[in-house]
Image (cartoon, rainbow, N blue to C red):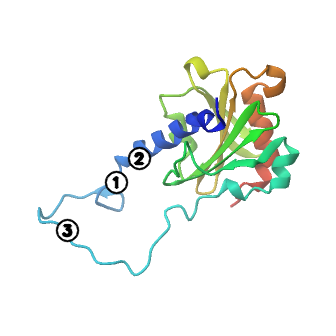
């Protein structure tokens, strides 16, 4: 199975969260919906400035290669897409381990730990910490339960998720238990996470 194929759990979380929030897009005033005032087509004018919706989102691809190499990750395998797609509202980076026993995906967004906890397509939610930051560990149910683990860490303007996905057929000695691996990597890379 290819490294990109192992990132499908990351794609599911990223795309699922985007779909969850898609229903919140509409006309509003101070967060309250407003009724439409006209059935005529809306006209727009060109904006003089643009706001990057991801401006406040930390980019995990900025982690130095030296830090990743020291943790046993192959920096040449770095990928900033999820299954070949650049997910809107998220900044994503992933790497393969040396040897190719597992993949680490790091996903950053403005979503919250509480939003992650509300997901019904994940299980085994456990509140924890990474350093002094609130965090949430969870897993995928079903066949990949023992191969994957997520550790979401609270940061200013959202959360950063560490996703470890063991490759099928990797021995436990090479890959390690995925939640223990996610914690090890998150703790080691916590110094690169955004601070208030």
Residue 54, numbered label: none
Q: Which residue is mark 2?
A: 21
Extreme residue in the front direction:
2
Extreme residue in the right direction:
70
| Residue 33 falls left or right of residue 152 | left
Number of residues whose C-alpha sits closer than 10 Å to that of mark 2, classed few (under 14), some (14–19) or many (20 or more): few
Compute the Cα span from label 3 to label 2.
23 Å
Is the N terminus in the top left, top right, bottom left or bottom right quadrant? top right
Q: Are marks 2 and 1 in contact (CB under 8 Å)?
A: yes
Q: Is residue 21 above or below residue 175?
A: below
Which label's residue is closer to the chain start, 3 or 1? 1
Q: Residue at x 84, y 22 (%)?
A: 173
Location of residue 84 in the rendering, given as x and y in whole percent from the top left corner: 54, 46
Q: Residue at x 83, y 26 (%)?
A: 174
| Residue 121 falls left or right of residue 177 | left
Q: Which residue is mark 1?
A: 25
């Amino acid at each position: 199975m290819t490294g990109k194929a192992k990132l499908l759990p990351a794609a599911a979380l990223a795309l699922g969260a985007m779909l969850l929030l898609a229903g919140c897009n509409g006309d509003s005033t101070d967060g309250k919906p407003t009724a439409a005032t006209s059935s005529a087509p809306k006209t727009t004018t060109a904006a003089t400035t643009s706001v990057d919706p991801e401006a406040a989102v930390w980019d995990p691809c900025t982690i130095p290669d030296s830090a990743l190499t020291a943790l046993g990750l192959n920096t040449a395998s770095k990928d900033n897409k999820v299954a070949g797609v650049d997910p809107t509202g998220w900044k994503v980076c992933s790497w393969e381990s040396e040897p190719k026993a597992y993949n680490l995906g790091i996903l950053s967004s403005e979503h919250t730990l509480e939003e992650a906890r509300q997901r019904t397509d994940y299980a085994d939610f456990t509140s924890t910490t990474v350093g002094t930051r609130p965090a949430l560990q969870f897993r995928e149910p079903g066949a990949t339960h023992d191969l994957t683990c997520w550790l979401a860490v609270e940061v200013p303007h959202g959360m950063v998720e560490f996703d470890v996905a063991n490759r099928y057929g990797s021995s436990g000695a090479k890959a390690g238990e995925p939640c223990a691996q996610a914690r090890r990597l998150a703790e080691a890379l916590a110094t690169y996470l955004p601070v208030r």
